Image (cartoon, rainbow, N blue to C red):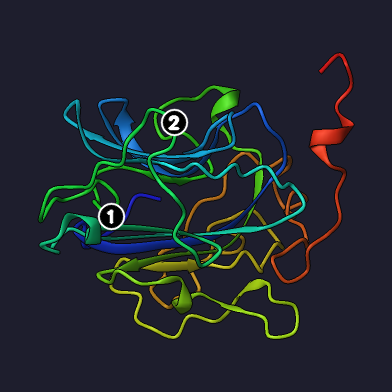
Amino acid sequence: RTFDEAGNTKTFTLSSWFKFTKTGNQDFLWMTGGDGNNIFSLVREGVTQLNFECTQSGSGVARFYTTDMLRDFSSWYHFVLAIDTTQGTDTNRMKFYINGVEPTMGGQSVSTSYPAENHDFLWGANSAAHFIGKRSYAVNAADWSDMYIADSYYIDGSALTPSSFGETDAATGQWIPKKFEGSYGNAGYYINFDDNSNTTAATLGKDSSGNSNNWTPNNFSVSGAATDSFEDTPTNNFPILNWNQTRSASD
């Protein structure tokens, strides 16, 4: 989606559920930017760790790399990225959560780099296309992510915590989605993917926030009915074959 109006590029929250399907490929979660010198990108890399990288005019402006290995293909993961560069303390300008918990950042040889005070990120600007599940500046087959997506939010103008989008189930102890009750802001959206009658911006890509900030679905197997849309959700999780144990010697 290319936004009709610019969002608040200093303060915003991205929240979504993802279920990965295999290792060895890059899964682009949120991304915008026309080339490697100008990107806003959160990607699960082949080593199954998350890499958040923001570069503008060739200079790095923010970065983190999780030590968490995200390779449980039977589970849904909930990610929340909260940005507020108006904060005076650098560690308060960027928060990230996995299933309601802040992970350890700065793993391997990559250190966490916080944005400068009052920095304007590329996400939310109305000058470029934004993508969920694809690299933003290439057209190769490998640039499409191979994963499930559910309950995808962009909250324009607020830096929120996971409790706005999820809660712990009292019976099971699992982290599960809950209905967001706050303001989306002008450019905000909520894509719940509940209308799979077609692969259009008015159906599968429909914004249910009330802002009409619809997204255009791409790369589905057929046009018309969304045959790539499934009932597997964070609260209706289907069993799958374990990719870590079913690969043949030729893989």
Depth order, front residue of 2/32 = 32
- Classify 203 as above or below 171: above
The kind of residue on which mark 1 rests is Gly
Where residue 121 appears, x then y in whole percent?
22, 48
Going 10% across and 56% down the picture, which residue do you hit?
118
- Classify 23 as above or below 168: above
Going 13% across and 63% down the picture, which residue do you hit?
86
Q: Earlier in the sequence, mark 2 or mark 1?
A: 2
Q: What residue is shown with label 2?
A: 108
- Would you say 79 lies left or right of 57 here? right
Q: Of helix, strand and loop, which one carries label 1?
A: loop
Going 38% across and 27% down the picture, which residue do you hit?
109
Please identify, in this view, whether the residue under mark 2 or under mark 1 is nearer the observer. 2
Where residue 169 appears, x then y in whole percent?
67, 81
The kind of residue on which mark 2 rests is Gln
Depth order, front residue of 149/196 = 149
Q: What residue is shown with label 1?
A: 124
Query: Could you classify mark 2 by the number of other residues whose Cα lies within 10 Å: few (under 14), some (14-19), or many (20 or more)?
Result: few
- Would you say 11 lies left or right of 166 here? left
Quarter of the image containing the C terminus?
top right
- Would you say 1 lies left or right of 57 here? right
- Would you say 42 lies left or right of 118 here? right
Q: Is residue 28 visible?
A: yes
